[in-house]
Image: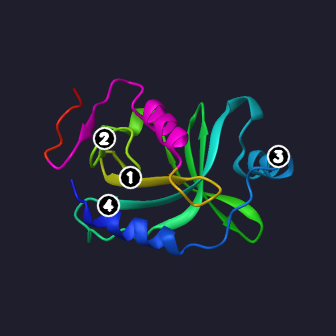
Amino acid sequence: MRLLPLIYLASTFTLAACSIPYQTPQARTQIEQDLGVSADDLIAISESGFCMLKYGDEAVCHAKAGLAVLTRKGLILSLYKNDKYVPAQVLKTADVLCGHTATSREAAEALNMFTTDYTFVLLPLDDQKKWNGPMHEKMIDYLLANGQPLLIGSGGSLPS
C-alpha cells in the first residue's frame, strides 16, 4: 500500500479554493441531467479529491478536485468544467477487490480502493473543504458491499 499518493492528494486540496456547486436544488437537478442519474438513485454527493493510479505506472497521485456522486449504480467521480458536471470515472462495488485506510475506518484520511488494474485514491470533502466523515463511511459501505475487506495500516491488517 502506497502512502506517498496520500501526501500529494492532501496537499492538493489544501490549496483548492473554488467550490463546486452541488447543494442547491438547481445544482442537484443539473447533476442528475449531466450525469444521467435518476433522483431516486442518488445516495449522497460530496466534493472530493480523487485520482486513479494504474499498477506499474509512476506512483504519483495527480489529484483532481471534483464531486463524488454516490448512486445505487456506482460511485461517479466527476469534474466540473464549463458549468457542466462531467463524469471522469465510475467505480462499482463489483469492480473493487478491497479497500485500505492508513489508520482506521473512521479516520480523517484518504481512502484507497483497489480494482484489478487501478488504485483509486478518494478524499471526500464537505463544503468547508474539510474531511467529510459521513460520505467517507457511505463510500466504504457501498464499495465494499460484497464483503470485500477494508485493510488498515501499513501492514494491511483487517480491523478487529
Q: Which residue is mark 1?
A: 109
Spatial CA distance of label 2 from label 4 is: 24 Å
Q: Residues within 10 Å of mark 1 (few under 14, many from 20)?
A: many
Question: Does residue 44 lie above or below 1 as drawn?
Answer: above
Spatial CA distance of label 1 from label 3 is: 30 Å
Query: Which amino acid type corresponds to the residue marked 2 in the rendered image?
Result: Ser
Spatial CA distance of label 2 from label 3 is: 35 Å
Q: Position of residue 16 (x, y in %)?
A: 57, 72
Query: Which amino acid type corresponds to the residue marked 3 in the rendered image?
Result: Thr
Single out the mark in the foreground, 4 or 1: 1
For the view shown, which residue lies furthest in the right direction?
26
81 sits left or right of 72 in the view: right
Q: Position of residue 160 (x, y in %)?
A: 22, 26
Q: Which residue is mark 4?
A: 54
Single out the mark in the foreground, 2 or 3: 2
50 sits left or right of 86 in the view: left
Question: Does residue 151 lie above or below 131 as drawn?
Answer: above
Q: Residues within 10 Å of mark 4 (few under 14, many from 20)?
A: few
Single out the mark in the foreground, 4 or 3: 3
Q: Position of residue 14 (x, y in %)?
A: 49, 70
Single out the mark in the foreground, 2 or 4: 2
**CB of mark 2 within 8 Å of CB of mark 3?**
no
Query: Which mark is first along the chain, 3 or 4?
Result: 3
Query: Which amino acid type corresponds to the residue marked 4 in the rendered image?
Result: Lys
Q: Residues within 10 Å of mark 3 (few under 14, many from 20)?
A: some
**CB of mark 1 within 8 Å of CB of mark 3?**
no
Query: Which mark is first along the chain, 3 or 2?
Result: 3
Q: Which residue is mark 2?
A: 104
Kindly identify the residue that appears in the image at 45 percent across and 67 percent down: 63
Q: Which residues are magenta?
A: 132-154
Spatial CA distance of label 4 from label 1 is: 21 Å
